[in-house]
């Protein structure tokens, strides 16, 4: 049941065209397919098809197949060779499926009375029999018969009449990019003229009543289309581009050709209901899905092992887009934060895998931070190594050479080799090896010469014990003792396990600014004292290293406090100096004022061989925040006042930056004023960004009961806002109550647990409370396991994904390990556990 990359074989038939006809009905939809095949290699006709397909008729060239002409085994339909008339034929099937009982939200399902689909990775096989693999591509013709007022599929509309719509997608595509939507929807519409003059009709489809929250998504789409033309020279290629928002969706969104389907939380926004972070995320996911039209759809993946070919590249592109539209340094720091929080964590635990895995049991378990975010980092490194021009030449060649292909990582790397003349054989390890390299830097100073000695080592990961050295681009600059940059950034290219680089002719010993812009996804280890770090925080020209210096100060303080030491004044002093510098971007100051997450401190301790105690870490965190508040009360009050944004709400980077700094100042002051400012802000604020920050501060101050009730009454009929309400209560609760609060919330009638957003809000909210989830009594583990078991029976993808909250279980003390292992074993022992959860849980248990 394990799939291996090495077993790849081309499909023996070419698919010339796919014709589909849907007779939609809630519990008995009929799907008729006609697939025109031509033989192109040896082998039988084997089609994928889920067990939920009721066969009404199978035929070849119109001749109904007799029972002896085919066999059905699990999710496979094999047609006897004797039933094939020759090398070219039309296979057709009529099947009945039941969208109303589809709680896994894979294939065709109902969400709030509307039909929609999710086919990536292997959902199409739950719609009809098909070669459901990304290297089988065909143009599609789709007819939808339904009384629903709006009927959508991929491509261009070719006929619409009441009760019927026909769509034609001329661009050959794999089945995972198929989509269908039918429902009572309204559109906000616009149009876009491409560089070459094609006029594209744009629609964002939402439920009636939601139109006034769809405008920002439309603006984001238009910005994305323009950006991809300007920066990558990529134009859109159909007459229409449709986006649909649905409430029940397993992931964020899906790039179906010409018909992107989105989780409604990534479309709908108004100042009263969405936060600045929501707006930024909507903008970037709209861009991400749009960018897939070229990196994913026009050029797709040969097989699912190559998933990072489209995802890593598309994440890289959406990161570039956000950097261009907003603040590049802030975006980089945010991306590094989330890479460390999610991908480094994954790399350091039992679920570690390379960006291009070579085996899996369930592909849906590999839509991970490693495939997506590390996949994007690897491309960032490639770009650093070959330079802007090399990158541009390589990408032009990629689009040119592989348009219409189902490609591989080898194809991708070859394009860079051919365009730049560089050998990437060693670089390829970034794709095939799991684990985060440790990079150690030592300095030597003699007579105006600085020598930097680097060594690299990657710890073993499951199935990969021995690691070879990787190519590591190390961006370095030097800062003179007076604070001026004496050497601008240069890229040192490390290829060996140990390697030295020298800088000559230096007047005085500089401070080294290393791993500028986080030039490689490694853990850097160097001896630098607090004075050196404070110096970099004050003077570095590289914003990432500047932020990193502050963060290191904070982490060191937290780490020593969590081991019984006292709060270190270096961080408190340095942060005060930075906060009072009004020349520094408020968003950057807000990032610096944020403390490293408790989870990150735990990871850092575990890495240093110390068993982390969540309660002590939590206490240290509170204490350090408190020290900052006390030392800088006046400054924080000044920031809270001066950063107030007046006038109407705008979700742009400037205003969001001011709000971010103001609200983190409030969060610190919250520890001194007992929630007074938060309570006032909650009453007076007109936007969700401030109200929600106020509400969470009030919870932390222990005075939110009335506010929570007000909030609930105000937003009871807005599911997305209610998700925030379910999330923040366990997330901001004191650790000893978090699991109990989550358990109480889960008993409410409005805990609609089958809705993925609602489920994730509550369980994710608890998991975000590090000391709460890991409470020593094990209640957090038990609560989570109970719900994972329940969810697995309804929606395996969601259960399996949420199970990663346990991935760090081995870090903790024996008592916690025993309880989390018991929870995992209880899940593993559940009868009829899905393949999804079974794979995840066994990988986590096997490491015990
Ligand atoms: N390709 C989509 C995106 O990155 C993600 C869809 C993944 N779906 C899944 N069931 N694994 O935008
Ligand atoms: Zn994607």
Image (cartoon, helix red, strand yellow):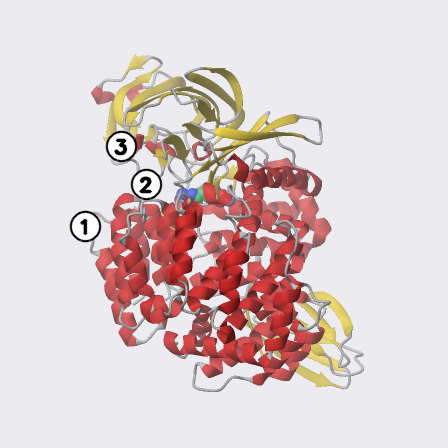
Q: In the rendered image, which residue does mark 2 sit on? A: 104
Crowd tier of the residue under label 1, counting other residues whose Cα lies within 10 Å: few below 14, some 14–19, many 20 or above: few
Crowd tier of the residue under label 3, counting other residues whose Cα lies within 10 Å: few below 14, some 14–19, many 20 or above: some
The x and y percentages for residue 349 are 39, 65
The x and y percentages for residue 441 are 60, 76
Q: Secondary structure at mark 1?
A: loop
Is residue 525 among the parts visible in the rendering? no
Q: In the rendered image, which residue does mark 1 sit on? A: 831
> Would you identify the image quadrant in which residue 223 lies?
top right
> Would you identify the image quadrant in which residue 331 lies?
bottom right
The x and y percentages for residue 805 are 36, 60
In depth, the one of 294 and 153 nearer the eye is: 153
Q: Secondary structure at mark 2?
A: loop
* Cα distance in 3D space between marks 2 and 1: 18 Å
Q: Secondary structure at mark 3?
A: loop
Q: Residue at x 60, y 51 (%)?
A: 319
The disc label shown at residue 52, or none: 3
* Cα distance in 3D space between marks 1 and 3: 20 Å
Q: Residue at x 55, y 56 (%)?
A: 685
Quarter holding the C terminus is bottom left
């Amino acid at each position: 049941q394990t799939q291996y990359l090495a077993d790849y074989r081309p499909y023996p038939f070419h698919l010339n065209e796919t014709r589909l006809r849907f007779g939609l009905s809630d519990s008995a939809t009929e799907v008729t397919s006609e697939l025109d095949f031509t033989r192109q290699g040896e082998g039988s006709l084997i089609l994928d098809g889920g067990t939920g397909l009721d066969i009404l008729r199978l035929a070849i060239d119109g001749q109904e197949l007799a029972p002896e002409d085919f066999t059905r085994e699990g999710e496979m339909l094999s047609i006897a060779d004797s039933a094939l008339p020759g090398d070219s034929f039309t296979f057709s099937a009529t099947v009945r499926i039941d969208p109303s009982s589809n709680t896994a939200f894979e294939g065709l399902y109902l969400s709030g009375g509307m039909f929609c689909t999710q086919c990536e990775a292997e959902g199409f096989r739950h719609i009809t029999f098909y070669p459901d693999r990304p290297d089988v591509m065909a143009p599609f013709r789709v007819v939808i018969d339904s009384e629903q007022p709006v009927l959508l599929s991929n491509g261009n509309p070719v006929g619409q009449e009441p009760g019927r719509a026909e769509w034609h997608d001329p661009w050959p595509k794999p089945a995972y990019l198929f989509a269908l939507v039918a429902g009572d929807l309204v559109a906000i519409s616009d149009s876009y003229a491409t560089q070459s003059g094609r006029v594209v009709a744009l629609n964002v489809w939402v439920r009636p009543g939601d139109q006034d929250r769809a405008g920002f998504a439309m603006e984001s789409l238009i910005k994305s289309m323009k950006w991809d033309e300007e920066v990558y020279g990529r134009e859109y290629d159909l007459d229409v581009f449709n986006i649909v928002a649905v409430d029940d969706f397993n992931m964020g969104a899906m790039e179906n050709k010409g018909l992107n389907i989105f989780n409604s939380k990534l479309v709908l926004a108004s100042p009263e209901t969405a936060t600045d972070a929501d707006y930024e995320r909507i903008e970037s996911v709209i861009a991400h899905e749009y960018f897939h039209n070229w990196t994913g759809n026009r050029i797709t993946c040969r097989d699912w092992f190559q998933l990072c070919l489209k995802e890593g590249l598309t994440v890289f592109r959406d990161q570039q887009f956000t950097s261009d539209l907003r603040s590049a340094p802030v975006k980089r720091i945010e991306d590094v934060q989330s890479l460390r929080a999610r991908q480094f964590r994954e790399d350091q635990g039992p679920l570690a895998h390379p960006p291009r895995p070579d085996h899996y049991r369930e592909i849906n378990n590999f839509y991970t931070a490693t495939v997506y975010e590390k996949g994007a980092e690897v491309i960032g490194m490639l770009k650093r190594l070959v330079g802007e021009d090399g990158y541009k030449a390589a990408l032009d060649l990629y689009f040119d050479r592989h348009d219409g292909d189902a490609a591989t990582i080898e194809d991708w790397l070859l394009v860079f080799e051919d365009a730049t003349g560089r050998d990437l054989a060693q670089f390829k390890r970034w794709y095939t090896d799991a684990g985060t390299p440790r990079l150690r830097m030592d300095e030597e100073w003699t007579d105006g010469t600085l020598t930097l000695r680097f060594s690299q080592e990657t710890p073993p990961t499951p199935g990969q014990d021995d690691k070879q050295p990787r190519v590591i681009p190390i961006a370095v600059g030097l800062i003179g003792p007076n604070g001026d940059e004496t050497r601008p950034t240069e890229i040192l290219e490390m290829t060996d396990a140990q390697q030295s680089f020298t800088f000559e002719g230096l007047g005085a010993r500089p401070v080294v600014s290393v791993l500028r812009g986080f030039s490689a996804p490694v853990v850097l280890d160097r001896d630098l004292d607090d004075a050196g770090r404070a110096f970099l925080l004050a003077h570095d020209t590289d914003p990432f290293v500047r932020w990193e210096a502050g963060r290191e100060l904070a982490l060191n303080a937290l780490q020593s406090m969590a081991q019984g030491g006292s709060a270190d004044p270096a961080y408190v002093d340095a942060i005060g100096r930075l906060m009072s510098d009004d020349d520094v971007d408020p968003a950057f100051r807000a990032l610096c004022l944020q403390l490293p997450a408790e989870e990150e401190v735990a990871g850092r301790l575990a890495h240093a061989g110390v068993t982390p105690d969540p309660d002590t870490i939590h206490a240290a965190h509170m204490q350090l925040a408190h020290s900052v508040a006390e030392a800088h009360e006046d400054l924080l009050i000044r920031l809270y006042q001066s950063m107030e944004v007046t006038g109407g709400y705008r979700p742009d980077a400037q205003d969001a930056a001011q709000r971010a700094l103001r609200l983190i100042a409030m969060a610190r002051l919250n520890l001194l004023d007992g929630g007074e400012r938060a309570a006032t802000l909650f009453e007076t604020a007109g936007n969700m960004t401030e109200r929600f920050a106020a509400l969470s501060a009030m919870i932390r101050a222990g005075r939110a009961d009335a506010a929570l009730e007000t909030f609930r009454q105000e937003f009871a009929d807005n599911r997305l806002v209610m998700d925030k309400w379910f999330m923040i209560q366990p997330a901001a609760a004191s650790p000893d109550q978090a699991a109990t609060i989550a358990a109480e919330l889960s008993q409410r009638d409005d805990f609609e647990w089958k809705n993925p957003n609602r489920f994730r809000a509550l369980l994710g909210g608890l998991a975000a409370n590090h000391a709460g989830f890991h409470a020593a009594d094990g209640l957090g583990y038990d609560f989570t396991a109970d719900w994972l078991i329940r969810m697995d029976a309804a929606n395996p993808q969601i259960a399996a994904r949420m199970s990663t909250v346990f991935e760090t279980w081995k870090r903790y003390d024996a008592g916690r390990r025993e309880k989390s292992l018991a929870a995992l074993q209880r899940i593993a022992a559940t009868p009829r556990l899905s393949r999804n959860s079974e794979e995840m849980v066994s990988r986590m248990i096997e490491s015990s």
